[in-house]
Amino acid sequence: MRLLWSQGVELSFRPGEFFGREEELTSLLRVCLEGKSGIGASVLIYGPPNIGKSSLLLKLKSELKLLPESEAPPSPFPFYYSFSNILSHPLALSQHFLQEYLWQLLVFLGESPPAAFDLDALCESLTARGHTECRDFLSAHRRYSEKGDGLSALANAFSFPFATGGNLLYPVFLFDDFQYTIKLQNIPEGAIFSILRPYIKSGHFPMIVSGSSPGHVTSSLKREGLYGSFQLLEVGGLSPDASVRAWAPLFDRRKIRMPEHLMVRAAARLGHVPIYQRMFAEEVSFRNAQIEDEVAFENLFALSITEGKLNRYWREFFENAIPDRVNRARAIKFLKRVMFDQFPIDTFEGAFSLLGTSPEEGGEILSALEFKGLLKSDFEHIQFIRDPVLSDFLFWAFERGVLGKNTSQVAASIVQAKISSGLVEGDRETHEESAEGAKEMMRRWDCREVPALLFDFGKFQERFREKGLLEIVIGLEEDARKVRLPKISSVSTGYRTLRGGSRFAFDLVAYGFRDGDFSEENLVIWAVDVNTEKTLTQSAVEHFENRCRLLSLEKGLNPDQLQKWILFDGAADPVIVELSDRYGIHLTHRTQMRFFLNLFGMQELEKGQEEKRPQETRAGEKPLEFELVLPIKADTEVVAARVAEEVAAYAALDKDTVDRIKMAIIEACINAFEHSESETGKVRLRYILSPERIELFVQDEGKGFRPSSAGDESKRNRGWGLKLIGELVDDVDITTGEQGTTVRMVKNLRHGTDEGSTTPDDEG
Amino acid sequence: MSDWTVKTREAGEGTSVVYVNGYLNSLLGKEMERVIHDVLDAGRPRVVLNFEGTRLINSIGISSIIGVVERMTERQGTLAFCSLNRINQELLRITGVSRYVRAFDSEEEALSYFEQSV
């Protein structure tokens, strides 16, 4: 492998995939050709890592080789040499440099590429071509190596090219990754420039030096008095045009298709950086992804930056750049604040204070970052590169490492931040109001059957357009198809689109279980958005669908386990209705929301009215009675509580009262489960609702128990059940005997519903 | 139940936030106690119990909370609650647990209380 060190970079370079940078190439070519007449300057190319500096050098090399031979000699011999993979020992470097130079020169002169780096054999081949100086240099080099004199060996090796060529050719040096020369063992920084100085000054030997750490290189140049001989050339992203063209060969080779308008967007999103484009193409091909629209693109981008190739690229970069974990975490946190949050930092003092380190420690971190080209400094100022991909990576690293969020969450926020910037913040109040209404409805629909038509706005509109309310209600009643809503166990509202905000920013997420079976397979999640814009836009639907996909991905849901639903207020284009249909999103218009309420005999909720709804049962009405039989099985008391909640919904009780009733019934059930030792394995519950009170009966058929004998409840800290029940309801009595135990609990509804129940805890 | 979980996050030097999600019954209660023991064993004496995701707490869950309070006292740790909903707050009041542990509306408040008292 060692033999291919430098060649590795060259072999991976594909001239066909090189795009743009025409201006840079033209001026570099001119510099190289001017070497012939002794007026050649030298160029320092700098820029962030992997922006394409090496590709530029290699492209220059291939252009130089393709020059027409009609020109009179001497002709330029482009010698590409990368310092990146060389051991830091000067003897190793000098040896390798000589090998590379001889090898490339022989190939340039038309020899078939020698199979190995046998220095003597290479030298013999060159001597055979009349370059006799080679032997002397080699024997001198051997002497220095034996003595261990690194500096002399280096001087020997780096002077050799200038003795070759004669009138036939002149070397053009394409030195890559030059920043590594400052890390040579026992060799002062800038020594290489000292050796090269006379040749640079002569103007006959053009030198293109490239590196990511221009601060160090320029200070070496200044020390050697060479600064004036060098032109500086900064390399950034490609021009938008060139980077869009760059997609073609990447996609063709991998047989990827992407709509044209997306190519522009994708190139911009990747900062017009060729290596990102290549990695993204690999990602698409690796995952066999279809990039048909913006959402699919953003999704894949987020995936790549959080767990795919782009992520690995930067992760490995940081692991290499700063091996120490603590310092790496510091650096990432620091860079995230500078690049992602755009914290304005341009001085060392500012950077140290943001890093929260001493100047020594901070200096080490900054120098590592500079070495890798993420920042550029002169004596006082520092400047950071701008890179949208790195910025998102830093966001991921920060959220993941510092805040402990999982990858899907971060991916979701990245996608959200990019896609959902269109949602209007000003409408928040109306939005919240609708979400609140929807939440309440979700609660009430629990376990009920709803005409399927209400979910399908397209068909609804087609069938009932411009008809009156009554007609539509009748129409719905005739509709035979029904959707059985899953049993909803929990409803939560999420808000909203800002980064780092709530998880998937749905307006409403409800979890339920089909057929009342609390198992993983029967879990159904409802994801609901309430759209209050004038029109339901394509981007809103796409954005919603996108979050749904992420949610499915995170929870590992089958398609039928996620119900997607948009409630909307304004108008919807037929195209949008069709799009939603394709995604399997239920659409429900606000006019339809009214029908839900009508169907359930409720009034539409107005803001703030929720807690003060008029009671629909009147004094003197016949009490409603409900019964439930529970198996004695862990956690089935939750079902009893849910039923209590439903029963309470008939009386439109406030939430605190409902919660108290639920807790009381849970405790009564647990008591029955624990103490009855019933042979039937069942507990019977009755709920009796009258305008004045709700009565709850929990009856088991066990051996009975004595509530006063608290000693029986010997488990540590136990025995709260009956105490809690006593506090939660207005009246409790327990009948126990050989036929079993019945706990009767009464909660009065007319008076005292608010006494004590809603006073917040005043504990200090 | 996959969504009944106890999760932990480190929130600075010696401080952990423990999230109890779901129905705090016997099973989840034991898990919560175990997690908190682990946190204490790892030398993290300050714990915020975040009940934001706790839908219900039954009496056995209350017993587990009391177990935690006892363990924290034994180990001279500091415990705070946060994000309790109304009914759960009420339950802790009725059972007297709230006399021993400070409850905060949000995790941030609880953490800044710890920061000030360090």
Image: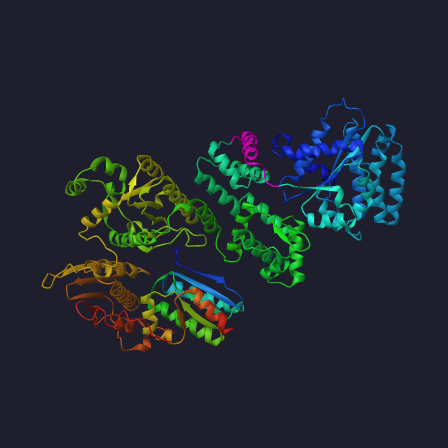
User: Is residue A323 visible to the viewer in this orientation of the structure?
Assistant: no
Q: Position of residue A616 (x, y in %)?
A: 15, 58
Q: Which color scheme did the rendering employ for the protein? A: rainbow
Q: Position of residue A98 (x, y in %)?
A: 81, 39
The structure residue drawn at horizontal position 76% and vertical position 49%, both measured from the top left corner, is A222
The structure residue drawn at horizontal position 62% and vertical position 34%, both measured from the top left corner, is A21
Residue A46 figure quarter: top right
Residue A250 inside the magenta-drawn segment: yes
Q: Residue furthest top?
A: A70
Q: Position of residue A644 (x, y in %)?
A: 24, 61
Q: Position of residue A605 (x, y in %)?
A: 23, 54
What kind of secondary structure does the magenta stretch mostly adopt?
A: helix
Q: Which quadrant holds the N terminus of chain A?
A: top right
A414 or B36: nearer the eye?
A: A414
Q: Which residues are magenta?
A: A236-255
Residue A389 figure quarter: top right
Residue A52 inside the magenta-drawn segment: no
User: Is residue B7 visible to the viewer in this orientation of the structure?
Assistant: yes
